Amino acid sequence: MAADVAAPVRARRRAGDTTPEFVVLGAATVLLALLGLAMTFSASFVQSTAQTGNPFGIFTKQLLWSAVGTPLLMWAALTDYRSWRRVAPALLVVSVVAAAVVVIPDVGVVVNGARRWIDLGPVRFQPTELLKLSVPLYLSHVLAQRWAALRRGDLRGLLVPAVPLVAVVFALVMLEPDLETAVLIAAIAGVVLVAAGLPGRIIAAATVLLGVSGLAGVATSGYRRGRVVAWLDPMADPSNFGYQTVQGYIALSSGGWTGAGLGQGRGKWLYVPNAHTDYIFAIIGEELGLVGALAVLAVFVVVAIAGMRVARTAPDPFGRLLAASLTGWLLLQATINIGSVVGLLPVTGVTLPLVSFGGSSLVFTMLGLGLLLSVARSVSPRRPPAEQR
């Protein structure tokens, strides 16, 4: 059966054909990547000049990371996604070991009170970014192996490989500490399970458990409690915990309908903290206005629709699960980032995919998009057979 399904896919690739989903996702990726470069420079040149005297310092790093990520994206998009099943276990082991190593004192690099990076000489590597890719890739591989049993309602076969893995990863990431990313990775794993047929009662229980874990993480950290209080009432502490939220609101509101113009915003003049990383959407709203901000949202909506269509029409269970999880990753992360900037969620350190500055984040997001594009090249114009749905 697998050979029968893959044959027309290979024939299509030899003919050089593409699918509508591939074209749409490819165009959205290019738009977000170009926007990311433009906004990274616009949002960072003031800080870069103040720190090093070179207005292009931060932008040059992002450009170099783009030069690394783009070939990886193209390679993954043009490679049969099924070949990644062979390396999925090894990639998971590497990412989990790296996540364990990073929390070791004098090994992991501490920035702003969190130990999240490994210094590799000229570059720093953030293991959690690799976990966002390796966890859904591995779960998609394992659950695809058990697909027939899962279709018969094998709940144990669905949960046993996922729950221990998510628990270990959650604990490691919390040791950094990084509650937001821990919750995000658990949610990405949840997308895989939902796509594999997780019953509604288990979804509800898992959501409650994740919520309780999040509340416990907030309750045990004064810094997180301060951010939650600032989210509920930013003006209660506008010069401390509420400062970033208030400055983000000012930047967004000053953009109006069409914005102040690219490069003309005032928020990046050391008013909005982390303007080129997790708060870049505030600068987008200020310089490109409501129209520009809504256009960015529209691109992510397009990615959601195309990604879900790829997941529904993928030629095999692995492709379906992988496409669903990668799409979920991008949308969950974008939702958390934008939601925190506009005040729907507490402030987090989660970046906006492809747009925010960040080396590890950009490279692994590009690699994940390459895998999604590879699945998109393989979609059938018809729905998958009943045994694959």
Image (spheres, rainbow, N blue to C red):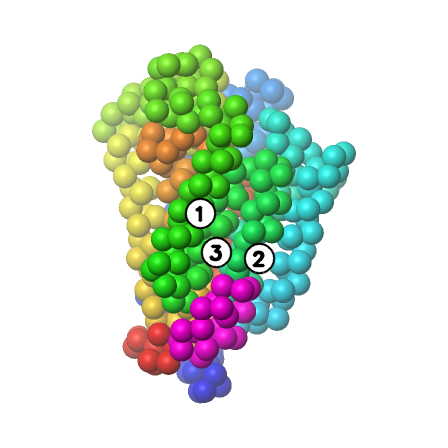
Q: Secondary structure at mark 2?
A: helix
Which one is in front, 51 or 235? 235
| Left or right: where 314 falls relative to 356 | left
Please determine whether, in this image, residue 103 is positioned above or below residue 27: above
Q: Are marks 1 and 3 in contact (CB under 8 Å)?
A: no
Prevalent SS, magenta region: helix
Q: Secondary structure at mark 1?
A: helix
Q: CA distance from mark 1 to mark 3?
A: 14 Å
Which residue is the site of mark 2? 164
Return the disc, 2 or 3, that comes first in the chain's sequence: 2
Which residue is the site of mark 1? 209
Q: Which residues are magenta?
A: 141-161
Q: Residue furthest left?
A: 257
Amino acid on which the number 1 mark rests in the picture: Leu
- Judge depth for marks 2 and 3 and give the one in front: 2
Return the disc, 1 or 3, that comes first in the chain's sequence: 3
Which one is in front, 368 or 335? 335
- The magenta stretch spans residue 158: yes
- Judge depth for marks 1 and 3 and give the one in front: 1
Amino acid on which the number 2 mark rests in the picture: Pro
Determine the image quadrant of residue 317. Answer: bottom left
Amino acid on which the number 3 mark rests in the picture: Ala
Tell me the quadrant of the picture where the C terminus can be found: bottom left
| Left or right: where 111 falls relative to 119 | left
Residue at screen point 45% across, 36% down: 215
Which residue is the site of mark 3? 189
Q: x, y percentage for residue 38? A: 44, 36
Q: Residues within 10 Å of mark 2 (few under 14, many from 20)?
A: few
Q: x, y percentage for residue 39? A: 43, 34
